[in-house]
Amino acid sequence: MKVVCTENSQVLATRLAKILRTPVVDVQFSRFPDGEQYLVAGDLDDETIIVGSVMGNDALVQLLLLVDACDNSVNRLVLPYMAYARQDKRFRQGEPISARAVAQALSRGVSDVITVNIHEREILKYFSVPAKNISLAGDIGAYIRTLHLDNPLVLAPDEGALAFAEQVASANGWDFDHLEKTRLSGSEVRMAPRQLCAASRSVVIVDDIISTGGTIATATGMLYQQGAKDVYAACVHGVLTGGAYVRLMATGIRDVICSDTIERACSKISAADQIASAIRRP
Ligand code: R5P
């Protein structure tokens, strides 16, 4: 077995290979003058673990090319982050189900797929090969423990993320809740925990994705207004687009934590252990 990866998953793939005690195949990446991508993979094996986060269109094309380059082996695809997953339904006539289009394209040439906190579990059915999802909720909880916060309150930014907040909190005996938006006027919105009170508490807002950071920035400001002692944000996928990290730090948030499904300076949690366990499980 060997591991091979796209350019943006080098750190995670190397960590994974170390745990699996297997080499990482060298891949030369380049571009043609017109911008089209090209790659040449080194010596592959009969079984190849292909690791590639799809973070944007170039990464998607690169992963498709890499899977195709590995067509002499049995390929298992690790898809730590899957772009387009948030368009998982047809919300209006004429729209694509983008998650389905991407999942179907990535199913070709692989025997199975492992995803990490996929935006909606329903997306797994769009792959035409067996697909399983792992969750880093426990790993986020373990990281929060290292902060030694006094009885932290774990908050989901909305009801949809409540189950994730519960998974992070319950194993540690922490309180959890979700934020609820109340429209005060045409331009004013209040965000507060639905049932619990944030005053004098250390709060950790948890979500699967931080993209523009808009949701967390608004919530952080409101929580400080409500007397929160300190506010942290933790997510699995730090998309952090368009200056999101800077914008978040300007709110007075104590820290923004994400995993290495998207490799960032603030990737303090690794998905490698869990992916390795999923690969070893029959
Ligand atoms: C939404 O469905 C996701 O779970 C996140 O809550 C969302 O992507 C966060 O977006 P942003 O960081 O742009 O507010």
Image (spheres, rainbow, N blue to C red):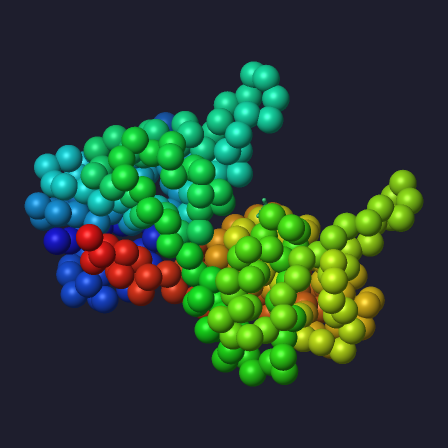
Determine the residue located farthest toward the top in the rendered image.
94
Is 235 displayed left or right of 243 in the figure?
A: left
Label tally: 0
Question: Residue at 31% across / 42% down in the picture?
Answer: 131
Which residue: 59% across, 17% down? 93
Residue 103 coordinates in the image, percent (x, y) = 37, 33
Q: Which of 255 and 282 is in front in this view?
A: 282
Q: Quadrant of residue 195?
A: bottom right
Query: Along the line of sight, which residue is nearer the eye, 86 or 181?
Result: 181
User: Which image quarter: residue 100?
Assistant: top left
Instruction: Say if 33 sits above or below 93 in the image.
Output: below
Q: Is residue 58 visible?
A: no
**Is residue 90 in view from this perspective?**
yes
Residue 14 sits in quarter = bottom left
> Horizontal placement of 270 versus 254: left or right?
left
**Residue drawn at the location 43% of the way across and 60% of the way down:** 136
Measured as percent of width and height from the top left, residue 120 is found at: 48, 42
**Image height check: is 86 above or below 174?**
above
- When the figure is inspected, residue 231 is found, relative to residue 58, above or below; the finding is below
Residue lying at 12% horizontally and 41% vertically, measured from the top left? 73
Left or right, 245 with respect to 185, comes to left
The single residue placed furthest to the right in the displayed view is 185
Instruction: Name the foreground residue: 130 vs 267.
Output: 130
The image shows residue 282 at horizontal and vertical percentages of: 19, 53
Residue 90 position, x and y percent, is: 55, 25
